[in-house]
Image (spheres, grey):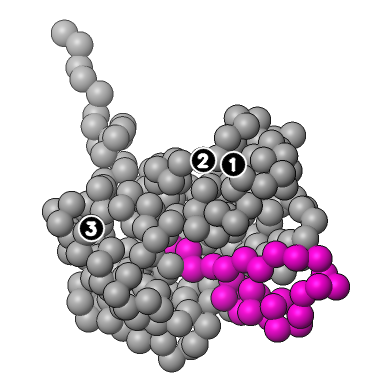
Amino acid sequence: MSVGLDKNEFPGINLFDLTGRVAIITGGSKGLGLAMAAGLASAGAHVLLVNRNKEEGENAAKELANTYPIDAHFFQADVTQQVETEAMAAFAFKQWGRIDILINSAGINIRGAIDELSLEDFKQVMDVNVTGTWLSSRAVIPYMKKGKRGSIINLASALGLIGLSNRTPYTSSKGAVVQMTRALSLEMAPFNINVNAICPGPFLTEMNLPIADTEEGLKFVVGATALGRWAELKEIQGAAIYLASDAGSYMVGAMLSVDGGWTAR
């Protein structure tokens, strides 16, 4: 008589279950942030959307709560301000008594030739994309240590791994996020906190709309991918669920490329 597999040893799809876990998603009210928040909510996680636009954030949270059987809330914060990121983490912990997942998705891009950009342009991109990621991570880590587990997912970029002209602020910032992810992953591994990054390729988000139909966008961005097309927002969800869940428990300091083959060339 044959004996079935032990489902505790081989849990399969159940590894992706996020029921009851709590996720904070910065920049979570639109674009990739909202797509990842929806992905986590579909797997059972309660979500806190964080951004600066109150109306946009509240509407997105309501839509998530109406779509999935989870709690969804909005918290207004500027991730470049330490006091606000600390308040963000405190709010989530007060609401649910735990913080399991942080997705650092807040980010901006200012394009242009280096001699046409200002120092302020460069500092602004670095402040949001790098300082904001560092501050948000710093704010949640004490709560994750208290819970003896956690997952931090940084949004890097294919442009943190390869170069592209007229992108010095953005590529510099995403390269920094890549290295921050690697360093922080080593620091947090002893505490059972997994730190990884997703490196998206060309998704047709609000950030990329200005170049969607330009020669630059079609030839040097979309044209650089093996698939030769813009990614759909839903195509980021699997990577986020994977890294946030027990399915990604052995992932430490990884750069998970979701780029249509851009960095494979």
The percent coordinates of residue 216 (x first, y second) are 72, 47
The percent coordinates of residue 198 (x first, y second) are 54, 52
Q: Secondary structure at mark 3?
A: helix
- Alpha-carbon distance for marks 2 and 1? 8 Å
Q: Is residue 230 magenta?
A: no
- Alpha-carbon distance for marks 3 and 2? 22 Å
- Alpha-carbon distance for marks 1 and 3? 26 Å
Q: Is residue 105 magenta?
A: yes
Label 1 vs 3, first from the N-terminus: 3
Which segment did they paint magenta?
Answer: 103-130
Q: Is residue 131 visible?
A: yes
Q: Residue at x 70, y 83 (%)?
A: 120
Q: Is mark 3 in CB contact (under 8 Å) with mark 2?
A: no
- Total marks shown come to 3
Q: Secondary structure at mark 1?
A: loop
Residue found at the far bottom of this picture: 83
The amino acid type found where label 2 is placed reads Ala
The amino acid type found where label 1 is placed reads Asp
Residues packed near mark 2 inside 10 Å, few (<14), some (14 to 19) or many (20 plus): some
The residue labelled by disc 3 is: 64
The residue labelled by disc 1 is: 259
